[in-house]
Image (cartoon, coloured by chain):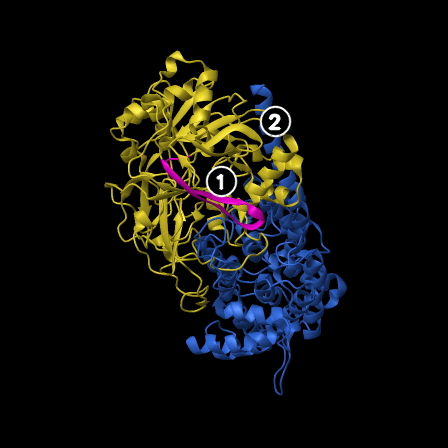
């Protein structure tokens, strides 16, 4: 450690004011503070401070996403081989599936991080701000919400759009209104709809010599099927719980999401209020549909409540997207309202609007926009309470 | 006995170095410093010159903008120096103490037989007035105002704080005399905030006060929290606050006729060699109490969350009842061994991202490292968990940061003091200095409204 510290100390002048690489100071700073928490002793206020910092917080979130990432890699391979009719049993060809998936997924991860961090470095260097850790999480979320066959250039474009327009123009980490990863996805969804929806993008069907796609292969996601009137063909409850279905890379397994949720709740980093209220909102809407569905003869509405929530990206959005503390409501009361409406709207959009097979992304983005308004009314209520008390006393 | 008020939000920090419940009589200090900087917002007008002889209870300086408020010497002796800093700001008035203290005679008095004006006059001339502070703004009270109520907290929940039950034992007469004085200052009530664990008869049997009982973690002992949960401050109202040991000084003034600024101070902290209670004087050199200290130790007059760094050669602050010795944390920390990616077995954290919450019995010796760099507000709900007020702390801080005066007031700034945000500052992931921000807001609001 001493040697490393010494090496850093020797390099520092190069990147400091007057040094040769002065322009890269904040890039240097980001790397130095990554390796060593600076020896900043408290100057004023509390003399001792909590051990937690933003780096550890963000790391915990990334750790929580690892089950989704690993399962996503395997499932990409699994779906691919299913389409080809090879290793069709779950237990077969684990390493082939995982290896295939890893080869597909890792480039997306690398592109997302490289583009996003690159842009952050440039912005921070121009603005002379330290580089904040926010993108470490966004950079991992973006690949997980992409279909496997997304071209890498599109990942780059989407990431660049999200970081610049979604975040940096507002002032960087902590200042953005919309969830960065969802901004990237929404941008691509509306800019390149053919590459982000339909039934051709969710499963990689590239074939080598001697391989062929099996007859009757569809490639549609469960929600895609349901939206086109084939609600009877959605994957079973257990398959959608474990995640053995087509979909965006990291979203399919409710189980993997729950593992992540467990870590986020255990560490207290994810808000249980939001997670619980999103679930409640989804439950409510799906329940209402269950009640009115038979009367309307709508098969989609009749999917059992729990099964409805396990499909698509509902669980993934619930655990990782809705809980983003920057774009969610900030007040406790606000969190309940915010979460409840995300769940409600997600199921509503998904079932009622055939143009959007999945409603989670739009529901979260919409409630991101609404969150400050919700907080405003919660805070106003607090102010009114205080004024009422003063009026009583006077 | 009124019913117990349960404070649910908050956090007790489990630190090493609690003071052993033994009171040591310290030697009379050879030199004392009285620091105008202990009184926020004060512009002092110094009344003495180096070489001048003073008695205990004689004024050293006064408030330039409220000339009746005097600040007295706790010892008799010779003024050694008026220590000034940048722009000739007065940092301290230093007095070399006599071996035997000579007191300015104010004569014993019975508050029951005095009217309010005479009592205030006596408190002012003896230098006892600055013990009385006011909310809003958390500054020395204005003698021209009349408070709605007066609040005293009879238990201290700050990390490693002095046990007031121990301090007050066998001093019931002084305490009661002081409380009787305060009772004459307001038409409202004198609230004495007790903990559900308060055992000292001196508190439980105190007369002329309303007992409020609280149960819960820090900051339940903060007078601000107690005000908020019994009779919150509304716009236009003023309440006064003071400490138990301050009341005892006031009590002694009326019993003996002397300004006797004796304090029982808990010497605490992981670096304290001999953590005990010491009976000494306001302004005494900390060295007298802590002995020799190795380099790399921070000496804080006050508690670890809101005290002031006075250094090894510093002096005890005017309001402080505790000294805390902490290891300095000015060394960089490698991320895998003791930085942000370490297992962190030795890191004290309210967050569950470190294992400290799984070891509720363990005590910690945190250093003064900031443990990360300052960031924008990212996490939400963190402050709220340790802030037992019906106030939205982050919204309030943001209103202060954008200097929105109306909003600050609406959001409840009048009810709080910086110390109420001390825990918020401790737990903050983004390392935002909320106490300094709140102080800034109070200053702005004070300037605008008075």
The reply to whether label 1 and label 2 mark residues of one chain is no
Residue B353, relative to residue B43: is it above or below? Answer: below
Residue B322, relative to residue A248: is it above or below? Answer: above
**What residue is pinned by disc 1?**
B36
Question: Does residue A314 show up?
Answer: yes
Instruction: Give the farthest residue toward the right.
Output: A191
Q: Secondary structure at mark 2?
A: helix
Quarter of the image that includes the C terminus of chain B:
top right
Q: Position of residue B80 (x, y in %)?
A: 42, 44
Verify whether residue B77 appears in magenta. Answer: yes
Instruction: Give the farthest residue toward the bottom.
Output: A209
Residue A96, numbered label: none
**What residue is pinned by disc 2?**
A387
| Colour of chain A as rendered | blue
Residue B41, relative to residue B380: is it above or below? Answer: above
Indicate the chain on which mark 1 is placed. Answer: B
Q: Secondary structure at mark 1?
A: helix
Q: Residue at x 45, y 73 (%)?
A: A91
User: Along the horizontal axis of the image, is B28 left or right of A27?
Assistant: left
Verify whether residue A275 appears in magenta. Answer: no
* Magenta-tinted stretch: B73-94
| Colour of chain B as rendered | yellow
């Amino acid at each position: 450690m001493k040697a490393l510290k010494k090496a850093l100390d020797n390099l520092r002048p190069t990147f400091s004011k007057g040094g040769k690489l002065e322009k890269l100071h904040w890039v240097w700073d980001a790397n130095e503070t990554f390796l060593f928490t600076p020896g900043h002793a408290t100057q004023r206020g509390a003399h001792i401070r909590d051990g937690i910092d933003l780096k550890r917080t963000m790391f915990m979130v990334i750790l929580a996403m690892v089950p989704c990432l690993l399962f996503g890699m395997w499932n990409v391979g699994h779906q691919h081989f299913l389409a080809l009719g090879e290793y069709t049993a779950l237990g077969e060809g684990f390493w082939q599936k995982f290896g295939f998936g890893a080869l597909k997924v890792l480039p997306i991860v690398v592109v997302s991080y490289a583009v996003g961090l690159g842009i952050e470095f440039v912005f921070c260097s121009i603005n002379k701000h330290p580089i904040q850790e926010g993108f470490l999480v966004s950079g991992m979320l973006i690949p997980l919400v992409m279909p496997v066959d997304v071209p890498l250039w599109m990942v780059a474009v989407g990431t660049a759009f999200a970081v610049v327009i979604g975040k940096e123009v507002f002032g960087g980490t902590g200042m953005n209104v919309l969830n960065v990863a969802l901004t990237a996805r929404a941008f691509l969804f509306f800019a390149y709809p053919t590459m982000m929806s339909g039934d051709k993008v969710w499963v990689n069907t590239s074939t080598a010599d001697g391989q062929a796609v099996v007859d009757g292969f569809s490639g549609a996601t469960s929600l895609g099927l349901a939206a086109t009137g084939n609600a009877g063909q959605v994957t079973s409850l257990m398959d959608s719980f474990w995640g053995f279905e087509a979909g965006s890379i990291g979203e399919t397994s409710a189980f993997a999401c729950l593992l992540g949720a467990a870590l986020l709740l255990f560490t207290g980093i994810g808000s249980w209020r939001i997670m619980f209220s999103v679930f409640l909102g989804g439950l409510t809407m799906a329940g209402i549909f269950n009640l009115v569905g038979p009367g309307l003869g709508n098969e989609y509405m009749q999917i059992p409540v729990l099964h409805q929530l396990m499909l698509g990206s509902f669980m993934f959005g619930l655990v990782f997207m809705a809980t983003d503390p920057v774009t969610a409501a900030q007040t406790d009361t606000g969190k309940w309202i915010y979460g409840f409406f995300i769940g409600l709207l997600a199921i509503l959009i998904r079932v009622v609007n055939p143009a959007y097979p999945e409603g989670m992304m739009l529901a979260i983005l919409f409630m991101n926009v609404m969150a400050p308004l919700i907080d405003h009314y919660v805070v106003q209520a607090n102010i009114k309470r205080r004024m009422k008390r003063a009026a009583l006393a006077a | 006995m009124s019913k117990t008020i349960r404070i649910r939000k908050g956090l007790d920090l489990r630190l090493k170095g609690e003071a052993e419940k033994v009171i040591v009589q310290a030697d009379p200090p050879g030199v004392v410093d009285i620091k105008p900087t202990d009184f926020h917002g004060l512009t002092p007008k110094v009344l003495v010159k180096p070489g001048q002889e003073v008695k205990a209870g004689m004024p050293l300086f006064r408030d330039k903008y409220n000339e009746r408020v005097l600040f007295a010497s706790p010892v008799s002796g010779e003024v050694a120096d008026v220590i000034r800093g940048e722009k000739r700001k007065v940092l301290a008035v230093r007095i070399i103490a006599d071996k035997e203290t000579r007191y300015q005679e104010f004569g014993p008095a019975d508050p029951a037989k005095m009217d309010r004006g005479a009592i205030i006059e006596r408190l002012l001339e003896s230098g006892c007035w600055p013990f009385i502070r006011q909310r809003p703004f958390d500054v020395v009270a204005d003698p021209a105002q009349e408070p709605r109520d007066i609040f005293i907290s009879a238990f201290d929940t700050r990390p490693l704080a002095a046990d007031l039950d121990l301090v007050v034992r066998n001093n019931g007469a002084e305490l009661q005399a002081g409380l009787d004085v305060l009772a004459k200052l307001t038409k409202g009530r004198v609230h004495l905030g007790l903990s559900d664990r308060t055992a000292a008869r001196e508190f439980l049997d105190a007369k002329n006060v309303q007992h409020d009982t609280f149960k819960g973690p820090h900051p339940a002992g903060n007078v601000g929290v107690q005000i908020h949960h019994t009779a919150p401050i509304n716009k236009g109202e003023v309440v006064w606050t003071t400490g138990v040991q301050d009341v005892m000084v006031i009590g002694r003034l009326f019993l003996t006729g002397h300004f006797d600024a004796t304090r029982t101070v808990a010497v605490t902290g992981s670096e304290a060699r001999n953590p005990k209670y010491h009976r000494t004087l306001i302004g005494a050199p900390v060295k007298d109490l802590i002995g020799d200290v190795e380099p790399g130790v921070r000496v804080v007059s006050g508690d670890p969350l809101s005290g002031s760094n006075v250094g090894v050669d510093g002096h005890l602050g005017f309001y402080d009842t505790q000294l805390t010795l902490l290891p300095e944390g000015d060394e960089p920390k490698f991320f895998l061994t003791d930085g942000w990616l370490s297992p962190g077995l030795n890191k004290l954290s309210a967050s569950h991202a470190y294992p400290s919450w799984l070891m509720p019995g363990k005590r910690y010796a945190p250093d003064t490292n900031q443990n990360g760099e300052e960031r924008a507000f990212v996490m939400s709900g963190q402050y709220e968990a340790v802030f037992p007020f019906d106030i939205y702390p982050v919204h309030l801080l943001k209103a202060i940061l954008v200097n929105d005066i109306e909003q600050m007031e609406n959001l409840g700034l009048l009810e709080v003091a910086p110390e109420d945000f001390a825990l918020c500052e401790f737990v903050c992931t983004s390392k935002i200095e909320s106490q300094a921000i709140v102080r800034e807001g109070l200053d702005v609001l004070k300037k605008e409204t008075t």
